[in-house]
Amino acid sequence: MKEMQFTAIVLMSLLTLKLLLLPSKAIVSPIMRRAWWLMTLGVALIGVQFLLQYILGLRELGVTQAVMLNLVFFIPCSWLLSLSLICLQRRGFICRSDKYFGPLTWVIALGLMAYAAAIDGQPLLAGSPEMRRAEIAASVCYVVMMAFYLWHHYKNIRFLIRALKNYYDEGWDDLIHWMRISAVILPVMGLMVPMMIFADIRVLFIFGLFMFMFIFFFVDSFFSYVVSSSPAKVHEAEEQEEEDAQEEEEQADSPRVSQQHAPMHRVEIAVGQWVAKGGYLRSGLKLPTVAEELGVPRYLLTAWLRNQDLKYADWMTDLRIEEAMRVLKQHPDWSNEYIAQHCGFSDRSYFQRKFKEKTGQSPSDYISSR
């Protein structure tokens, strides 16, 4: 157990140092800076927790003593790390419930354990049935807190996905892939912690390895995300989603637009002409670019796609896959690389993956089945 605690101290120290050494030019945005501080504090607190466990030897004293320290530190750690994700997901906006639910849970947990220590008449670090029950109750509070943040992560990620799919023709998933994984694993790990801290050494060791790998992935992915162009691209898509929604609402309230079929018919005609000309056979097309080429406002194109029950990225992919199927029938000798380029896909692997998702077959299998 000592070896695992020492490993955790070294790992958390290195990860904290990596975050502290993040280039200042990469975190000029107040949003990035806020998320960076939240994550740095969260990771540093995990390291402090393992350091105290190592120095005090609480696991050797008994499960109750170790669990007490774990709860005291893991609740604020999980809260800080969850807030760092929420900060990125909501462009820096953290609502009051997200901000105060974690501290409230922590105060309740401390209160339960303090009350148990007061009524059992034993030293704080002495194991007692009362303290054990208090720790179980505090663990339940911890589970409720992490379930609360899991739900909020789920809602935030859904909004991000919608915004990105309504703006970029492809590659949107790569921008927030790490965030989607982290938004699930972080709360799930938090839900597991209350059960694992009561487990024996062997189970705890396995869970500890999993936790170390995830924290490393979390911090390393955050580092890579911040120094890349991804935050700016995500921010761009989020802004358009909000602007289009606002503009559509304003137009709907306008007395001049009492009938919606006329503008939708206009979009339908423009889209038909644009598709007939093969306007979609270029990669890297953003929705504003297409709207400009169609000669319609962005919000109208977005509304038209919504009426078709389509996201912009899915619509572009469908058009390109249809073209790829036509080309494969007429030119089975063409390479996948050339077909991907011809149809507007960024690369061959992306084309092959999307083709199989849409048709259930690889391009070569599709040719063989004709």
Image: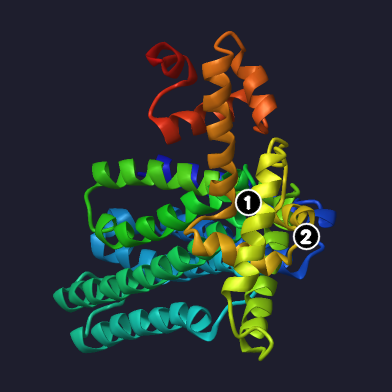
Q: For the point 58% across and 81% down, which residue is it?
A: 259
Q: Amino acid at mark 1?
A: Phe
The residue pinned by badge 2 equals: 295
- The front one of 13 and 230 is 230
Relative vertical location of residue 69 with respect to residue 283 in this rendering, above or below: below
Mark 1, other Cα within 10 Å: few <14 / some 14–19 / many ≥20: many
Residue 368, position as x, y percentages in the image: 41, 11
Q: Does 120 sit left or right of 296 as displayed? A: left
> Where is residue 13 drawn, in percent x and y?
60, 50
Residue nearer the viewer, 32 or 80: 32
Q: For mark 2, give the secondary structure.
A: loop
The circle on residue 103 is: none
Residue lying at the far top in this picture: please name it.
333
Q: Which residue is mark 1?
A: 222
At label 2, the amino acid type is: Gly
Q: Looking at this rendering, what residue extends furthest in the bottom direction? A: 255
Residue 306: x and y, percent?
52, 63
Residue plotted at (62% across, 43% down): 170
Q: Residue at x 64, y 77 (%)?
A: 248
Pointer 2 or 1: first along the chain: 1
Between marks 2 and 1 in the image, the one whose residue lies nearer the viewer: 2
Q: Are marks 2 and 1 in contact (CB under 8 Å)?
A: no
Q: Is residue 164 left or right of residue 366?
A: right
Q: Position of residue 101 (x, y in %)?
A: 44, 81
Disc 2/disc 1 C-alpha distance (Å): 39 Å
Within the image, what quadrant is residue 162 found in?
Answer: bottom right
The residue sitting at the left extreme is 129
